[in-house]
Image: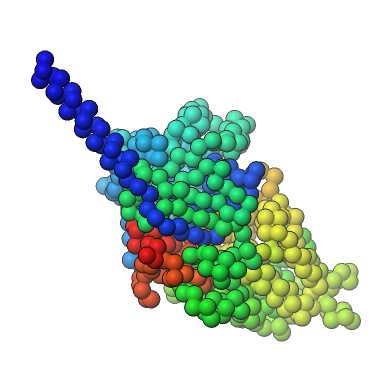
Amino acid sequence: MKRLVLVAILIVSLFGMVNLSASAQEAPKGTWSGTWPYVLPPDHNLNGWATGGLNDNLGSIFRSYVTLPFAFYHWADDKYEGLLAEKWGYTADNKAYEVTLKDAKWSDGKPVTSDDVVNTFAIGRIMGWSDWTYLSEVKKVDDKTTQFVFKGEASPLVERLILKDYVVDSQTYGELAKKAIDLVAAGKKSADQEWKDLSAEITGLKPETLIASGPYTYALSDVGQASMTLHWQPNSIYSGSVKFGEIKIWQGETEQSTPLVLSGEVVHSTDVYPPATIDQFKAQGINLVTIPRGYGPALLFNHSVAPWNIKEVRQAAALAINREQNAFLTGSGAVGTVYMSGLLDDNVPTLLSKDVIDKLDHYDFDIERAGKLMESVGFTKNADGKWADKDGKVVSAEYKFPAEFADFAGAAQDAIAQLNAFGFDITARSTPWQETAAAIRESNFELSVWSWASQSPFATRQFFGPVQRFNKGTLAEGQNGINFPMQFEWNGEQVDLNALINNASNSMDNAVRMERAGKVALILNDMMPFIPLNVEQSVEPVNTKLVTGLPAEGDAILKNPTGADHWIILYLLQGKLAPVS
């Protein structure tokens, strides 16, 4: 009996030591401070799927500190490094992909399991995740391992989609996930009302608590008008490595962050700053790190508004804009687009064959050629030097651009000036960025500006923006976006551009991927559904008076673009970045 009592005491003592060890872990000192245009109260919410939720409030950098993705991608090496995942890879027959989790916990102390992964992807299916274009099933193998079954071919594109998704907790979303699984089992599709109702229920959820897998979390009480704060939590696999006790996020865009950077109240910012402001940073000795931005501004046409539904008019507009000049006035080290293929110029040699590259029209600045194109479709210049149709109607439009985005505003205003010099009658309209984006989605514009391409090494994802991103089918029901028809005749054959884009990178064979991407590139180059004006660099202030541990100039990790693969994410999680003592 005494022996049993002693064993019981020993067990209690051991549990006490474990609890003492956990509670004794103190939050690290110091505050990391950044900027992001998070949604202000009372519209701010903690839902990982909703408008005004985690994606809007944290962006891809800050969200990675709260909700870990499976892995981080190194662009220079074409390799993944596990974050939430311990191991990952294709099955032997290439019919599926498997991910095994690390021994991770949620901030409430519960383990992160494959149930959370299955539930995350079940909800993602209802919410229209791109992953489900290529997946037929996501199933639990064991408590740590999840299998993703391919619909058709295996591909590194699907691998990236899977590994970059944020896994959410079943405590918050489990009941909704069960409804999603049951709905699919019942044979329901996205067009069915039950599917739409569940989607609305998912986005309507207002969690009272944010359960985090990353080393930081926050509550609605941490969100203010000027700033919000993420607090360290002890249960993440990265809680012991990060060197900051809290992350302060200043609200706003370039206008709001500029004085904060200059005053030393911001450690790091990804905002776009005009050249004069960059010079101010340099004069104050603020360190600048330049990395790819992975996108640039594009001139968007509303294809339901004449004459932008005429290919030759769009081609003429592309020829009438000097893109090098436009890039200079965009700022941020922007470079005029060369290949006009829908792909970032730096990636063209690796994503397209030489034969396709040689066929691409560069649309070099050529007013004479632009004029001949206008004349070929019945337009002539009137007495005022303006292009008009056969009925005398002048080519005119309103060009909406976001007031707060210095890069997009600069690109738009220069494009307007150059198009007017060519003979169009374009008027500028500056609106808040949220209104500009909403107007594009709702097709409430004639001309506008938003990003093209994306921060992805794969052609499919670069082609996505804006021709799919802001178009019928991808947008919510009733939203038509740029209204570019995705099924049409091209070079004597009927094409489905949606299907071609989705399939472009969907193969393990690089030669096949290049061939498929080449066809899409030639179509976009000819049809010119949008004008990719330039590609930006991200010139980012990092205050080395406040933080230490930056990568050396020329380090391979600086080939990673801003966004979900930003070097800051990995360096902060691993504790390489630390407060200056």
In this rendering, is residue 342 above or below 224? below
Task: Pick whichever, 493 or 19, lies toward us.
Answer: 19
Q: How is the image coloured?
A: rainbow
Task: Pick whichever, 340 or 172, lies toward us.
Answer: 172
In this rendering, is residue 302 above or below 223? below
Q: Position of residue 166 (x, y in %)?
A: 44, 47
- Res 96 seen here: no
In this rendering, is residue 547 above or below 106? below
Which residue is pictured at 47% across the width and 54% down the height? 247
Q: Position of residue 568 (x, y in %)?
A: 42, 62
- Res 453 seen here: yes
Task: Pick whichever, 485 or 553, lies toward us.
Answer: 553
- Seen in the image, is 155 located left or right of residue 327? left
- Seen in the image, is 192 located left or right of residue 320? left
Quarter in which the N terminus is drawn: top left
- Seen in the image, is 485 located left or right of residue 292? right
Which residue is pictured at 71% across the width and 84% down the height? 368
Quadrant hosting residue 435: bottom right
Which residue is pictured at 53% across the width and 64% down the height? 265
Q: Position of residue 200 (x, y in %)?
A: 61, 36
Q: Position of residue 348 (x, y in %)?
A: 47, 71
Which residue is pictured at 57% across the width and 58% down the height? 250
Quarter in which the C terminus is drawn: bottom left
